Amino acid sequence: MKTSFLVVYQEFGQWIKQRLGCKCQKISINAGFTCPNRDGRLGTDGCTFCNNQTFNPEYCVTHKSVSQQLAEGKEFFRHKYPDMRFLAYFQAYTSTYAPVEHCIKLYEEALAVEDVVGIVISTRPDCMPEELLDYLEKLNRRTFVLVEYGVESANDQTLKTIHRGHTFQTSANAIRRTAQRGIAVGAHIILGLPGEDTDELLRQADLIARLPLTTLKLHQLQIIKGTQMERQFQEHPWHVFSVEEYVDLVSAYISRLPRTFVIDRFVSSSPKSLLVAPQWGLKNYEFANLIRNRLNTKI
């Protein structure tokens, strides 16, 4: 018999509308950042799962300015929602991994674009200098700011296996440092990394629950063509969650979190041309509906 859940949680879209008073859409930006796991500081091959092509839209390319990428992103979404406002989402690679002055210049360029009402910065927990936090603390007083850290796992052995280059304690420290500044802070977690079964992931959920997070983004592990993980999976396959298993896992995971956490995402969709596994064939909204039904949640 399946466990019955009755869990009340906040979804990102509703939360941001309540916070900013308008419907908002993130627009991804590739501002030309690199990563310490690629430029030689920590490594040159990146994390074993990483292929940035899986989430960058066509307009999101480095030869276009931040302003141009935002303009094209606005045009893409505006035909559906004429009154939409936008969040500049610095998503590609490590979006704080550059001299602080350069980062500030890019962020300010984004915020100067019409109808951009805030900024979301995706980065690694080992790439947030105090000087940049000083700036973000001040910026947070005049616009919406969310810093999203790639935590990926709360298991140090897993982090070593995937060549992440930092520990869970590094993530916890960065999240606390950011939250102490009054800045909204998010975490990105991958569910289903090699060696992490349901019991282990629920153990990690209890650790994540104790962090001062504003938002949480959950993704199923996706094995992507051209990555180190694809080669490892082909040589020594491991169990990949089915849809039913993942729905049960996410339901149990969320039930362990504080109600104050805003759930940004349950699942991710990569282009079919790049995806090795899992082959679920579901769109993000279809999976979200499965989760809502499983949780019997009243939104």
Image (cartoon, grey):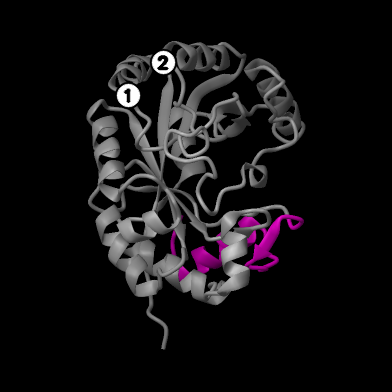
For label 1, the crowd category at 10 Å Cα-Cα, with few meaning under 14, some 14 to 19 and many 20 or more, is some
Residue at 62% from the left image edge and 42% from the top image edge? 52
Residue 26 or 166: which is nearer the viewer?
A: 166
Residue 98 or 178: which is nearer the viewer?
A: 98
Residue 184: image x %, image y %? 35, 33
From where the camera sits, is residue 7 visible? no
> Was residue 146 drawn as part of the magenta stretch in this picture?
no
Compared to residue 52, the image places residue 288 above or below, namely: below
Residue at 62% from the left image edge and 28% from the top image edge? 30
Residue 144: image x %, image y %? 43, 24
From where the camera sits, is residue 209 visible? yes
Which residue is labeled 2 in the image?
A: 100
- Using the image, tell me which numbered label, if any, was put on residue 227: none
Quarter of the image holding residue 114? top right
Placement of the N terminus among the 4 image quadrants: bottom left
Task: Residue type at mark 1: give it.
Answer: Pro
Residue 139: image x %, image y %? 38, 16
Compared to residue 3, the image places residue 137 above or below, namely: above
Tell me which label, 1 or 2, sits earlier in the chain: 2
| Distance in Å between CA atoms under marks 1 and 2 | 8 Å
Residue at 29% from the left image edge and 49% from the top image edge? 168
The region drawn magenta spans: 272-299
Q: State if disc 2 and disc 1 touch (CB < 8 Å).
A: yes
Residue 273: image x %, image y %? 76, 56
Which residue is labeled 1 in the image?
A: 129
